[in-house]
Amino acid sequence: MTRLSAITPSGHAHAGNHLGALRHWARDGGPEDLYFVSDLHAMTQSYSPPRLRALTRELLAVLVAEGIAPERLCVQSDLVRELGALTWLLECVCSYGEAARMTQFKAKGDAAARLGLLTYPVLMAADILLQGAAEVPVGDDQLQHVELARSLARRFNSTYGEVFTVPRAVTPPTAARVRDLSAPDRKMSKSTRDAAGTVFLLDPPDLIRRKVARAVTDSSDHSAGVAYLPDERPGAANLIEIYAACAGVAPKEVEFGSYGELKSAVAEALVEELRPVRERVQELLADPGELDRIRADGAQRARERGAHRLSSALRLAGVG
Ligand code: AQP
């Protein structure tokens, strides 16, 4: 059974990506799973090409450093020809109305929006269908995109002939949803403008300590006992959840006498949780040869894995 997951190089990876996704990809994945850096998806809004290239490389290093087996990794743009061809086939079985209904397009799309913002869910369908993925672990915000991939697979299969596995979305088991430390009403995010609330995987320990020390706890009385109240005190609950995720316990089991103690414990837990990843990323970035090899091998494997599906789809569609 193949599962497929991706991380978009829209910024530096952070503790939310690690606790909510990356460490699970490393621990729970099967031998057929595929993880990729979705650099093509980072192009739907204004971006800097040199920064995109550097972030793509950094995120590939992060995935390796997280312990994901190199044979399960690739970079999306290394398959740009295959994905470009398949995206076109799928766009030709997708209606404009279906694409325009995607909530992310409805939220950000206006007349000036890049056409890629409208069509990138079709590219995501191509990512999934090219590799024959059966399961796609996603959060609620991406469910609609997997539904589109299912519809396009079924429609292509029934119109031209059976080629594609119809994928299904799976919700990852209770992964942590880490919130911004300064604005706990929103999730920790790569593309945040205010880095104070985001603990990046590559932040040095002292910076992590400073960011956690300044985290919002929703209480002016820092000596008061710590209670896990996600609705009333989302900032404190976020810190408790981060500590619980690092310590491998349930948030309700976390007990501290004061917010000061909680913050020190969260800072040290995060520093130790992220230290091996940061150190390994630094080694990988210092040795370009190893990363280049991993990337080239991953591209070749992913290309070979999708080749027969793409050629069958082109043939059945009467082209290629
Ligand atoms: N704050 C978070 N807590 C837990 N999990 C998170 N993920 C993202 N943010 C958190 C999970 O990380 C994986 C890769 O993320 P993505 O590249 O698909 O992008 P995203 O969900 O849009 O994440 P970001 O970091 O917030 O990026 P931007 O700022 O570009 O939107 C996914 O499995 C995601 O659920």
Image (cartoon, rainbow, N blue to C red):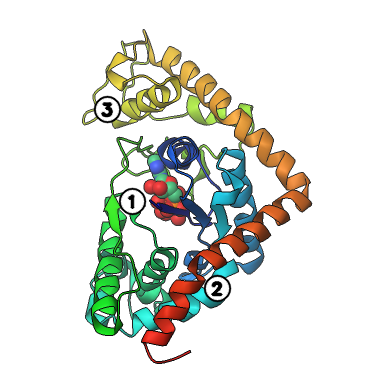
Name the residue tied to disc 3: 233
- Decide: marks 1, 3 in contact (CB < 8 A)? no
Name the residue tied to disc 2: 80
Position of 315 relative to 304 (above/below): below
Looking at the picture, tell me which residue is in the foreground, 109 or 297: 297
Q: Is residue 301 something that shows in the picture?
A: yes
The amino acid marked with disc number 2 is Val
Where is residue 101 shown, x and y percent of the image? 23, 72
Position of 63 with respect to 16 (left or right) is right
Q: Nearer the viewer, mark 3 or mark 2?
A: 2
Position of 150 relative to 110 (above/below): above
Which circle's residue, 2 or 1, is located before the other in the chain? 2
- Decide: marks 3, 2 in contact (CB < 8 A)? no
Where is residue 263 shown, x and y percent of the image? 45, 20
The alpha-carbon separation of the residues under discs 1 and 3 comes to 27 Å
Q: Residue at x 34, y 70 (%)?
A: 164
Image disc number at residue 79: none
Q: Using the rendered view, name the quadrant where residue 39 is placed.
A: bottom right
Which circle's residue, 1 or 3, is located before the other in the chain? 1
Position of 13 with respect to 224 (left or right) is right
Q: Dot 2 surroundings within 10 Å: few (below 14), some, or many (20 or more)?
A: few
Which circle's residue, 3 or 2, is located before the other in the chain? 2
**Label 1 CB less than 8 angstroms from ligand 1:** yes
Name the residue tied to disc 1: 138
Q: Dot 3 surroundings within 10 Å: few (below 14), some, or many (20 or more)?
A: some
